[in-house]
Image (cartoon, rainbow, N blue to C red):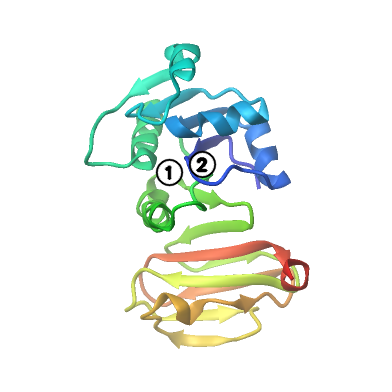
């Protein structure tokens, strides 16, 4: 899947070939200030940089001065500031990269922000290990046999049915995040059926389980 617009957060450096390909082919790259070092190491130029500047080295502040949009607000983290800039620029179909890894509190906050902003921006999140996709209605996913799949419900009252996964579920509500984790695709597609409105986060790994050992 291709996403023309990317947000690069200041987490783990993007290294997976699929994530690097997205960066190389992106039309617009909105970079959280501390993530500039990731792009520099990959030889990729951002479209814009946003943040309070606390993570920018002095030499980077000079080099990227024309691209930098300062935002010193303490009410929002840098990922929210990046989404706000995307809104101002009229960007959607966004893939977020570099938002997981390193500090776990940032990872949890960024995943919740992904779900919050996904409706408006049609946003997903790529890590070095897989893809997080928020959904709000019944959705079919392309997959492959053996792909690891986890489903996290942000709306515990929403009944879910799984089609095409190793461990089937029928009209079940998931009140804890762990309950829908560690499933497996049986073939080339699977479907997560929502029986009422809800906010669901679906994770698919790049590698099959046997290749992760």
- The foreground one among 13 and 192 is 13
- Residue 43: x and y in percent read 66, 25
- The foreground one among 60 and 30 is 60
Q: Residue at x 50, y 78 (%)?
A: 180
Image marks 2 and 1: residues in contact by CB distance under 8 Å: yes
Q: Which residue is drawn at 70% across and 39% down?
A: 21
- Seen in the picture, residue 72 relative to 99 is either above or below; the reply is above
- Residue 97: x and y in percent read 54, 44
Secondary structure of the residue carrying numbered label 1 = helix
Looking at the image, how many numbered discs can be counted on the residues?
A: 2
- The foreground one among 98 and 188 is 98
Q: Which residue lies furthest to the front in this view?
A: 58
Spatial CA span between label 2 and label 1: 6 Å
Q: Residue at x 43, y 30 (%)?
A: 33
Q: Earlier in the sequence, mark 2 or mark 1?
A: 2
Residue 104 relative to residue 1: left or right = left
- Residue 203: x and y in percent read 56, 64
The residue to which callout 1 is attached is 121
Judge the density around disc 2: few (<14), some (14-19), many (≥20) Cα neighbours within 10 Å.
Answer: some
The residue to which callout 2 is attached is 93
């Amino acid at each position: 899947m291709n996403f023309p617009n990317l947000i690069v957060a200041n987490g783990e450096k993007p290294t997976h070939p699929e994530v690097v390909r997205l960066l190389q082919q992106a039309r617009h790259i909105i970079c959280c200030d501390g993530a500039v070092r990731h792009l520099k190491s990959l030889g990729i130029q951002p479209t814009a940089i946003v943040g309070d500047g606390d993570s920018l080295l002095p030499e980077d502040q000079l080099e990227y001065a024309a691209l930098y949009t300062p935002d010193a607000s303490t009410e929002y983290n840098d990922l929210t500031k990046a989404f706000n800039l995307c809104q101002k620029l009229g960007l959607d179909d966004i893939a977020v990269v570099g938002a997981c890894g390193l500090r776990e509190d940032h990872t949890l906050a960024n995943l919740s922000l992904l779900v919050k902003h996904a409706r408006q921006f049609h946003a997903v999140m790529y890590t070095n290990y897989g893809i997080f996709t928020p959904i709000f209605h019944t959705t079919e996913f392309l997959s492959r046999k053996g792909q690891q799949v986890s489903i996290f419900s942000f709306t515990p009252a929403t009944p879910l049915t799984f089609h095409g996964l190793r461990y089937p579920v029928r009209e079940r509500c998931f009140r804890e995040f762990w309950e829908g984790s560690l499933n497996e695709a049986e073939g080339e597609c699977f479907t997560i059926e929502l029986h009422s409105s809800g906010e669901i986060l679906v994770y698919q790994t790049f590698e099959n389980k046997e290749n992760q050992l």
